Amino acid sequence: MRRGWIWAGAAAALVVAVAGIHAYRYYYDRKVPNFSGTFELYVRPDMAPSEVLDSMLASGYVLKPRSLRRALEYEGGLAAMQVGHYTVDPSASSMYVARMLTKGWQTPVNLTLSGAIRSPGVLARKIGAQMLADSAAVASFLYSNDSLARYGVDTTLLFCLVIPDTYQMKWTASVSEIFDRFRKEHDAYWTPERERQAREQGLTLVEVATLASIVDGETRYVPEQPTIAGVYLNRLRIGMKLQADPTVAYCYGYTLNRILRKHLDVDSPYNTYKYAGLPPGPISCPPKTCLEAVLHPERHGYLYFCANPAFNGSHLFASTYAEHLDNARAFQKALTERLKNHR
């Protein structure tokens, strides 16, 4: 009889111990942080579920791998993980991360559009490099008037729609969702006040974007952008051709190292040496600084400008052609000397 009680007591103790272990695991998996640092996780469509787990373990931040495995199994197993971008931080428990991965609680990524964006192909590559969307699919969308029609633009006016900035969105966003966001931010930028400022310059919103893209092609030196915008607006007001080199560069697909006199005769509506007024649409994605420069141009009497012979990125401005020729000769002399010294 005594031996029976001993066995019964041992069995009861074992049950209590097992229950305690399960209770501890249950508590740990759900309540205790199981990560020692923050890390970014990308679950790609072509990844095997085991690869995702391996990448998490390889980070070195998982304190108890078994806890993470249990939580993932409880939430449907490794195969239940959804494609996306996720941020795992030290405060997370195994169960929270398992649910995050299986329910698709994504962390937004920053889609940053910056630098020279002078063709739909460049724009497609910038998007494809940062988002799940394939750059080829993005390019197909950008070159399709049918796709762009829902945003009120076509391939000619594409760069009116896209304002370079940093956009937070899901990494898995479709191409149309990405452009829905571009449209939303475009509409938010063009407030009634900015529309009024455009009218004060005698320009439509398309014309503002078009002129801003030319200013962007002339200089990245932000303090001078309102001055250059003022030059072009002065030319427009007196009916003078814009004669903007960036528009000629656009005609040649930005393949020219230098624009020579022979290039100025190219027959294109974008050639502002040949045709008066603004070209049909923007020649690049104009940044906000250039849009603001056109909306708030410097008031002056300049009609001409050329690069500064100091080669510091600034320009010399002139009100008369004779003065401009003096400035141009000074720059050409400095350029010739510079090239000679670098041979």
Image (tube, helix red, strand yellow):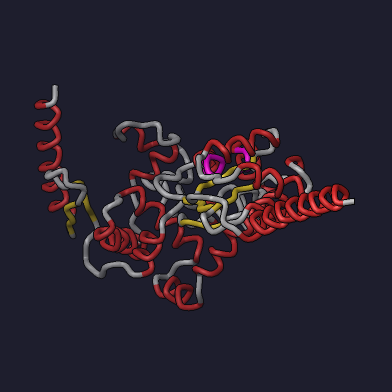
| Location of residue 78 by image quarter | top right
Q: Residue furthest front?
A: 2
Residue 280 appears in the picture as rendered: no
- Residue 319 place in picture, x, y as percent: 18, 60
Q: Residue at x 59, y 64 (%)?
A: 184
Q: Nearest the camera: 324 or 22? A: 22
Q: Residue at x 56, y 52 (%)?
A: 88
Asked if residue 90 lies left or right of residue 226, the reply is right
Asked if residue 257 lies left or right of residue 4, the reply is left
Which region shows up in magenta? Answer: 126-134
Q: Nearest the camera: 81 or 270? A: 81
Answer above or below: position of 273 versus 222. above
Q: Nearest the camera: 210 or 23? A: 23
Answer above or below: position of 244 versus 333. below
Asked if residue 343 lies left or right of residue 87, the reply is left
Answer above or below: position of 56 versus 242. above
Residue 267 appears in the picture as rendered: yes
- Residue 216 place in picture, x, y as percent: 36, 52
